[in-house]
Image: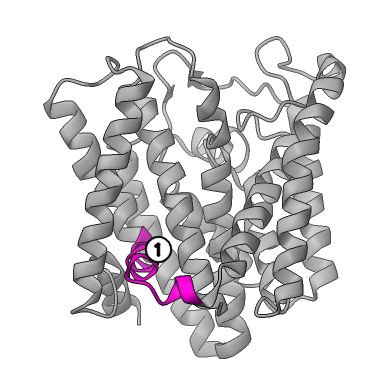
């Protein structure tokens, strides 16, 4: 299976997880704990998306690297920053404005060797516990309302962006740089995909056990009364969570690259891959359309886990049908087309 369609399928499956987690955030009974099966997706879908973004940038850099390429990526980062900031006013857990800063930083890292990219990834993962020990993680948060207080004050904004936001640069940029590392591998080779799948599977199995053994040690860190730095939870994004997210990304990417050629040629695979190429469009659509429907029908904070699942599956099916029909007429998704025309 060629790497492009495999990666598009990986983006599609990550989109399902992202939609499920975000819909659950706004629909689920207020104050009710998430069902156990939700832990399969929480933090992992977003981590996979960021890893795939880094992988995509890395592949593009290998093919087009030069001054014009750098300028184009900088323009796209500015575009993502603008639409991301606008989205924050609607959905506080927006990831797009973080993407903008990932791109701004990572564009200068693209030419680096694989060993250097791995070292940077490890450094970002280890930098977060150091900050966690020094700076109170709860700063500026109202966790009951999931609101960041006075976000647009410069000091608070920088704190949110780099340390205690939903997807802070330290350590979330590590997912992006790991994706850039993956872009330098021979992804078209079955052995590479097999290794990614195997290592990812091992990590997903072993890391929860490592977390259970390590969590008592987290009491030595600041903020441990509210959060456990050594859990697999994305809040806070401690080292074991980061490794879990990387493992999930490797597993999904490797598995999608291993899917047989016969499946790739089916209409189903083409529809799913088309949806994967339109993820920017679908990200905003699931917020403005999906969450708009939730609000219109009065489902905010009132839905059971089963209802969240049914709504998500229904929404994704509509998204797949839209992308399949759209892709038959246009090369890129609606928002992807706008970004292309604005940024080149």
Quarter placement of the C terminus: bottom left
Asked whether, in this view, residue 72 is left or right of residue 183, the answer is: left
Residue extending furthest front?
A: 262
Name the residue: 25% across, 21% down.
Answer: 300
The answer to whether residue 35 of the structure is visible from this angle is yes
**Which residue is at the front of the view, 250 or 122?**
250
| Residue 245 percent coordinates (x, y) | 65, 45
- Quadrant of residue 151 in the image? top left
What secondary structure predominates along the stretch shown in magenta? helix
Using a 10 Å C-alpha cutoff, classify the residue at mark 1 as few (fewer than 14 neighbours), some (14 to 19) or many (20 or more).
Answer: many
- Name the residue at the left extreme: 296
Estimate the x, y position of residue 158 in percent, counting from the top left. 55, 41
In the shown orientation, is residue 289 left or right of residue 15?
Answer: left
- Does residue 66 show up? no
Does the magenta segment cover residue 275?
Answer: yes
Viewer-closest of 79 and 49: 49
- Residue 95 colored magenta? no
| Quadrant occupied by the N terminus | bottom right
Decide: is 296 above or below 20.
above
Where is residue 181 drawn, in percent x and y?
72, 68
Residue nearest the observer in this picture, 44 or 309: 309
Residue shown at the point (57%, 34%) measured from the top left: 40
Name the residue rendered at 27%, 14% in the picture. 302
How many labels sit on residues? 1
Q: Which element is circle 1 on? A: helix
Residue position for label 1: 276
Q: Which residues are magenta?
A: 262-279
Relative vertical location of residue 339 with respect to residue 126 in this rendering, above or below = below
In the rendered image, residue 105, in percent from the top left (x then y), is placed at: 61, 63
């Amino acid at each position: 299976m060629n790497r492009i369609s495999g990666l598009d399928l990986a983006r599609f499956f990550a989109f399902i997880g992202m939609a499920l987690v975000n819909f659950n955030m706004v629909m689920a009974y207020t104050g009710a704990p998430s069902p156990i099966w939700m832990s399969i997706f929480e933090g992992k879908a977003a981590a996979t998306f960021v890893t795939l973004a880094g992988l995509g940038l890395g592949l593009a850099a290998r093919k087009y690297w030069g001054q014009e390429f750098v300028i184009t990526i900088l323009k796209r980062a500015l575009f993502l920053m603008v639409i991301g900031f606008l989205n924050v006013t609607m959905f506080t857990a927006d990831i797009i404005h973080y993407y903008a800063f990932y791109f701004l930083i990572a564009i200068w890292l693209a030419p680096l060797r694989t060993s250097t990219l791995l070292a940077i990834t490890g450094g970002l993962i280890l930098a977060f516990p150091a900050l966690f020990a020094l700076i109170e993680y709860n700063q500026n948060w109202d966790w009951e309302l999931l609101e960041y207080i006075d976000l647009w004050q410069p000091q608070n904004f920088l704190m949110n962006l780099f340390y205690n936001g939903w997807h802070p640069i330290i350590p979330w940029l590590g997912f992006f740089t790991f994706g850039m590392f993956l872009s330098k591998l021979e992804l078209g080779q079955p052995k590479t995909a097999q290794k990614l799948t195997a290592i990812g599977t091992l990590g997903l199995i072993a890391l929860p056990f490592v977390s259970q053994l390590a969590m008592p040690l987290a009491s030595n860190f600041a903020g441990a009364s509210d959060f456990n730095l050594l859990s697999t939870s994305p809040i806070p994004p401690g080292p074991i969570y980061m490794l879990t997210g990387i493992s999930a990304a490797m597993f999904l990417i490797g598995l999608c690259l291993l899917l047989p050629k016969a499946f790739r040629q089916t209409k189903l695979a083409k529809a799913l891959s088309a949806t994967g190429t339109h993820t920017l469009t679908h990200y905003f659509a699931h917020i403005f359309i999906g969450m708009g429907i939730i609000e219109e029908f009065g489902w905010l904070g009132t839905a059971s886990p089963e209802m969240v699942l049914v709504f998500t599956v229904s929404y994704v099916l509509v998204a797949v049908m839209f992308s399949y029909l759209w892709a038959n007429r246009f090369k890129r998704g609606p928002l992807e087309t706008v970004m292309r025309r604005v940024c080149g």
